């Protein structure tokens, strides 16, 4: 009877009606219409009924075949699994529950995946036909409305089809396992005997899969119970990504709507959190984009530059790689990549200054291309966004060319071809036709950025247009088609574009630090049998060869390596270098532990460095046999060395020996100094960044020696146009961050003390030979150094440009306001607004500084400066956000100084400088913050007391004004004095601005310094102040270059 009922239902379903389970649902209550097109529906109310009928018809057309196919597959699969797994289960209720859980999830998921694409096309077709028949709207609006409405209601149709599939699957699976259930109910007929007779194949199953007597154990039941925990929305998202329809993000991407990544689904796998992770990654990637815009707009010379002309290791390349790594390491890689790509596209078309300059456009398109390498949906989604956007964006030739050349916009995409064909309207839309012809002429014919196979759909459409316009053929179309035919006949391939493709990717590859496999990730496949022995034998042969001093034999050995296929630039090349480094490091470590072998411990390490040198030197003679270049060969060697170092450090822990790796990197640095161009230095800087002390603490001393070596540090800092400053700044910051926890708590074991002394010596060399480097990066260095390291900070702040002659701070008639340098702002390369830009404080602060804010801003200022979590507080060692305070102090001063300069200079001397909103901010922080917060603010102010410049003058006036105006807060005066005095009682050097501020404080009777109670609170304190005063008032010094004091 059940079979007859099913046949009758199928026959009735052939008429195209909906199943009974959803016939009673009023679809009209659930149909949604995009707010952007509701105006026409308000004008013509009858259109909504046509939309509902069209959607209903579209669902009716495909629901029965989709449901039938999905249910059939799901029921067969469920039946076979249940009959095997529950062969000896005595609880019939458990069998039924498990079968229901499995079949409804399988049927629903299959129905979703199967129906998504056909339903979208059916809905769009039905809507298009229904709206055209009304004859109240034009055809172009109908097409756009059909696509948008179909996308808006696609989920509704999928839910109805899924509901029908799951309900039918529950009915059918009960019938299909009824025979087995009858056997269970038959008295004196053991189920396992009947099952073994019917399932002869059971004995062939492995023991682990063979059913056991009795009920299923809990972990076996969990397989079926987990079906109830599957996130249904995630299945729908996967189905959407598997089809070609425009996603929800695509519909609103260019309408200015914020489309966040999908939220985490309830009931998902433990620890999933994909949506939250995607949102966090999106925020960090957006910060990279904002930093890139700030870098470009801050430097006018970069506006007309190209990305490929920038040096390797440039900040812009680093920001692209940083965003790429964030997306690549995210568990929700696709969602995060698509969300960030949407942000980039919106920035590309927002008409801002960043998107109007060449470098900005190239940076955005290079970011999209880099994203597409790790999130494969990016290209598809970007193409869909462009296809369904308005004409201003679709017909923007410059942006479209940039996206096509970077291989992000796919001209063969069905969505893009269809929309462009409709837009050209068989050649009647001249603007669209000229756009397509111009685009293909540029990208296909002139630049060869794409091949004819990349734009077949558009070429076919242009061919039809040319054939249809018999009387007046479009000359541009005819000429383009002829060129395309010639290219197709010659088999011409796409040529990498120098501005966005090959050179940019090369720069990004060189900028990327050598990657180390993270724990938990898939390991590299095992080496082929015998490969390690072959490499080891080759190395031993190479050692003997170079000891013979036979140049002809050396070249023959290299040719043998090529003939064996070890230097082609593929996976075997990676394995060759990795095994070579491992063998040399192990042999060196073993020999160093034996006193009798220490004399020859480095023989193989030096031989390996010599091999790399010879390969680089003679590359031009054998480069036809490999894809390697000099730069990629060095990068591969350094990356392999760093990976092996990480592995040894992770496995051997305290038994790690840094000497083999130090020797190898040192020999490579010395041997390749003359054989490689300037780019080699940046490769070494990136490799050292990848093995910094925070990552490989056992390599710290060798790392510091390599960083400060005469073959690396001077070459980085002497690079043209200061190209190497960014890379070296990154290395010094890494060292400071490693030592910061030890320095902050004053817990310094002997190794850390020795490392600290080495750091001081490196900074002293920088102070003497490269003071401008310390001057321009002083802010980020002070950010990374704890407040307790006074001498280290003094050393950095004492630097001043070499061409400057410092006035004697102890001269009795010194008037700093008359110094010509005092009106010039200092150059600051550190991103001092970074912490402030990431805080919600920035917009309110800008309003207040411009005079448009309210006093409410000052009342909430303290809360913004506090850290929000206990973990952050414990890690920082303070309740306050110190980087934010430093950024706030300097940003507020820069705003005040720029306003004063725009007004033609201060009118009224020092008093004029210390008036206005900026001073109110400083005064409010000093009054309202507790002792700890006030000390951090005063330290941030004192960090700007450096060589003569407008910042030093301003902050000196601010500090003295705060001292004078805090008459009712004696603790403020005491803390100001403490900040100054603790920087003066340490060993030299002392910053020039610090000296002139303290001398002014103790000499000027306005401040009545010697009559304050804290100066005479004890005899020891009074003697300390008198000693410092004698030092400041009796010194006579000055100098040129390096440091003051």
Image (cartoon, helix red, strand yellow):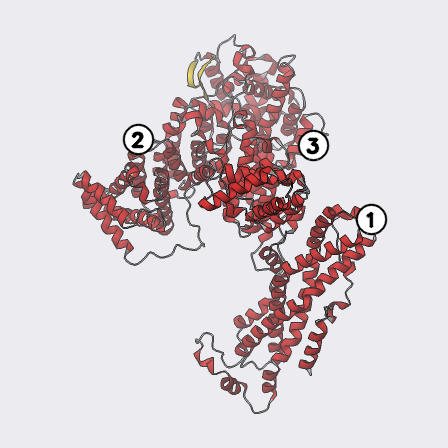
Task: From the image, tell me which residue sits under label 1.
Answer: 42
Closer-to-camera residue (40/263):
40
Of the two numbered discs 2 and 3 in the rendering, the one whose residue sits closer to the viewer? 2
What secondary structure is marked by label 1?
A: helix
> Which label number is shown at residue 857?
3
| Position of residue 6 in the picture relative to residue 225 (left or right) | right
Q: Is residue 974 above or below residue 884?
A: above
Q: Is residue 1016 above or below residue 655?
A: above
Which quadrant, please, contains the C terminus? top left
Residue under the image location 56 percent in, 12 percent down: 817
Q: Is residue 904 above or below residue 37?
A: above
Of the numbered discs 1 and 2, the one sitting upstream in the chain is: 1
Q: CA distance from mark 1 to mark 2?
A: 76 Å
What secondary structure is marked by label 2?
A: loop
What is the x, y in percent for residue 501? 48, 39
> Which label number is shown at residue 674?
2
Bin the neighbour count of mark 2 within 10 Å (Cα to Cα): few under 14, some 14-19, many 20 and up.
Answer: few
Residue under the image location 58 percent in, 46 percent down: 463
Bin the neighbour count of mark 1 within 10 Å (Cα to Cα): few under 14, some 14-19, many 20 and up.
Answer: few
Bin the neighbour count of mark 3 within 10 Å (Cα to Cα): few under 14, some 14-19, many 20 and up.
Answer: some
| Position of residue 860 in the picture relative to residue 735 (left or right) | right
What is the x, y in percent for residue 786? 49, 34
Query: Is residue 77 visible to us here?
Result: yes
């Amino acid at each position: 009877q059940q079979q007859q009922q099913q046949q009758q239902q199928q026959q009735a379903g052939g008429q195209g009606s909906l199943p009974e389970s959803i016939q009673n649902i009023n679809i009209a209550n659930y149909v949604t219409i995009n707010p952007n097109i509701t105006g026409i529906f308000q004008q013509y109310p009858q259109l909504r009924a046509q939309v509902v009928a069209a959607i209903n018809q579209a669902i009716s057309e495909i629901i029965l075949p989709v449901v039938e196919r999905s249910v059939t597959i799901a029921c067969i699969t469920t039946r076979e699994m249940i009959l095997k797994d529950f062969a000896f289960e005595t609880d019939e209720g458990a069998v039924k529950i498990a079968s229901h859980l499995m079949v409804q999830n399988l049927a629903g998921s299959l129905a979703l995946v199967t129906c998504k694409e056909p339903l979208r096309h059916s809905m769009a077709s039905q809507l298009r036909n229904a709206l055209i028949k009304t004859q109240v709207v034009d055809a172009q609006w109908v097409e756009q409305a059909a696509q948008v409405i179909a996308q808006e209601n696609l989920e509704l149709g999928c839910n109805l089809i899924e509901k029908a599939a799951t309900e039918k699957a529950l009915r059918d699976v009960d019938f299909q396992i009824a025979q087995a259930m009858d056997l269970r109910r038959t008295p004196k007929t053991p189920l396992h005997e009947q099952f073994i007779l019917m399932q002869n194949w059971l004995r062939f199953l492995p023991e682990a899969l063979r059913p056991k007597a009795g009920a299923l154990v809990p972990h076996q039941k969990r397989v079926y119970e987990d079906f109830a925990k599957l996130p249904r929305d995630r299945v729908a998202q996967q189905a959407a990504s598997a089809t070609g329809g425009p996603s929800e993000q695509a519909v609103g991407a260019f309408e200015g709507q914020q489309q966040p990544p999908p939220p985490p689904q309830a009931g998902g796998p433990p620890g999933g959190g994909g949506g939250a992770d995607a949102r966090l990654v999106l925020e960090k990637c957006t910060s990279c984009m904002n930093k890139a815009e700030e870098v470009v707009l801050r430097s006018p010379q970069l506006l007309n530059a190209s990305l490929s002309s920038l040096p390797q290791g440039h900040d812009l390349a680093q920001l692209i790689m940083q965003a790429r790594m964030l997306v690549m390491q995210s568990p929700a890689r696709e969602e995060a990549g698509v969300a960030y790509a949407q942000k980039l596209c919106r920035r590309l078309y927002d008409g801002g200054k960043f998107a109007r300059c060449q470098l900005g456009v190239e940076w955005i398109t290079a970011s999209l291309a880099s994203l597409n390498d790790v999130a494969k949906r990016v290209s598809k989604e970007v193409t869909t966004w462009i296809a369904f956007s308005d004409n201003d964006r679709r017909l923007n030739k410059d942006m479209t060319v940039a996206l096509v050349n970077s291989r992000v916009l796919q001209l063969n995409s069905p969505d893009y071809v269809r929309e462009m064909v409709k837009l050209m309207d068989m050649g009647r839309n001249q603007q669209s036709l000229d756009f397509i012809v111009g685009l293909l002429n540029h990208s296909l014919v002139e630049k060869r950025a794409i091949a004819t196979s990349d734009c077949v759909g558009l070429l076919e459409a242009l061919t039809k247009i040319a054939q249809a316009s018999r009387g007046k053929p479009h000359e541009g179309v005819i000429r383009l088609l002829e060129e395309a035919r010639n290219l197709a006949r010659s088999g011409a391939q796409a040529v990498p574009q120098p501005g966005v493709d090959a050179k940019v990717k090369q720069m990004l590859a060189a900028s990327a630090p050598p990657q180390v496999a993270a724990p938990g990730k898939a390991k590299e496949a095992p080496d082929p049998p015998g490969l390690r022995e072959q490499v080891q034998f080759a190395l031993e042969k190479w050692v003997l060869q170079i000891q013979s001093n036979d140049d002809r034999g050396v070249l023959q050995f290299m040719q043998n390596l090529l003939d064996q296929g070890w230097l082609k630039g593929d996976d075997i090349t990676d394995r060759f270098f990795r095994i070579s480094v491992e063998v040399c490091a192990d042999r060196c470590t073993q020999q160093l532990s034996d006193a009798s072998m220490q004399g020859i411990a480095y023989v193989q390490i030096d031989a390996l460095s010599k091999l790399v040198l010879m390969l680089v030197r003679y590359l031009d003679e054998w480069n036809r046999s490999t894809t390697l270049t000099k730069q990629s060969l060095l990068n591969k060697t350094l990356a392999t060395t760093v990976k092996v170092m990480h592995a040894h450090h992770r496995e051997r822990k305290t038994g790690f020996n840094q000497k083999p790796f130090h020797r190898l990197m040192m020999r490579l640095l010395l041997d390749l100094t003359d054989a490689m161009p300037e780019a080699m230095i940046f490769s070494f800087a990136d490799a050292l960044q990848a093995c910094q002390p925070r990552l490989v603490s056992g390599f710290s001393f060798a790392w510091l020696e390599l960083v400060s070596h005469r073959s690396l540090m001077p070459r980085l800092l002497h690079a043209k146009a200061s190209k190497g400053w960014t890379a070296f700044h990154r290395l010094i910051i890494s060292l400071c961050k490693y030592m910061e926890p030890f320095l902050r708590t004053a817990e310094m074991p002997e190794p850390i003390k020795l490392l600290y002394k080495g750091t001081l010596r490196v900074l002293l060399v920088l102070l003497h030979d490269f003071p401008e480097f310390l001057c321009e990066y002083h802010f980020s260095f002070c950010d990374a150094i704890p407040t307790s390291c006074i001498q280290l900070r003094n050393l950095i702040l004492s630097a001043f440009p070499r061409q400057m002659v410092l006035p004697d701070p102890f001269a009795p008639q010194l008037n700093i306001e008359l110094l010509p340098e005092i009106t010039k702002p200092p150059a600051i390369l550190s991103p001092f607004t970074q912490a402030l830009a990431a805080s919600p404080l920035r917009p309110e602060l800008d309003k207040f500084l411009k005079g448009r804010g309210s006093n409410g801003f000052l009342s909430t200022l303290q809360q913004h400066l506090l850290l929000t979590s206990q973990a952050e507080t414990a890690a920082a060692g303070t309740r306050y956000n110190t980087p934010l305070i430093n950024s706030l102090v300097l940003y507020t001063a820069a705003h005040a100084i720029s306003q004063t300069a725009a007004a033609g200079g201060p009118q009224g001397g020092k008093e004029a400088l210390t008036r206005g909103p900026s001073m109110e901010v400083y005064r409010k922080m000093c009054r309202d913050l507790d002792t700890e917060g006030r000390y951090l603010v005063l330290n941030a102010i004192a960090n700007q007391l450096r060589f003569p410049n407008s910042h030093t003058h301003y902050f000196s006036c601010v500090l003295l004004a705060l001292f004078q105006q805090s008459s009712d807060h004696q603790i403020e005066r005491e803390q100001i004095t403490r900040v100054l005095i603790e920087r003066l009682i340490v060993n030299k050097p002392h910053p020039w601005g610090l000296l002139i501020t303290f001398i002014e404080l103790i000499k000027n009777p306005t401040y009545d310094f010697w009559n304050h109670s804290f100066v005479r609170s004890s005899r020891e304190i009074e003697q300390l102040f008198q000693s410092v005063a004698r030092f400041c008032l009796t010194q006579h010094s000055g100098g040129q270059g390096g440091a003051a004091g």
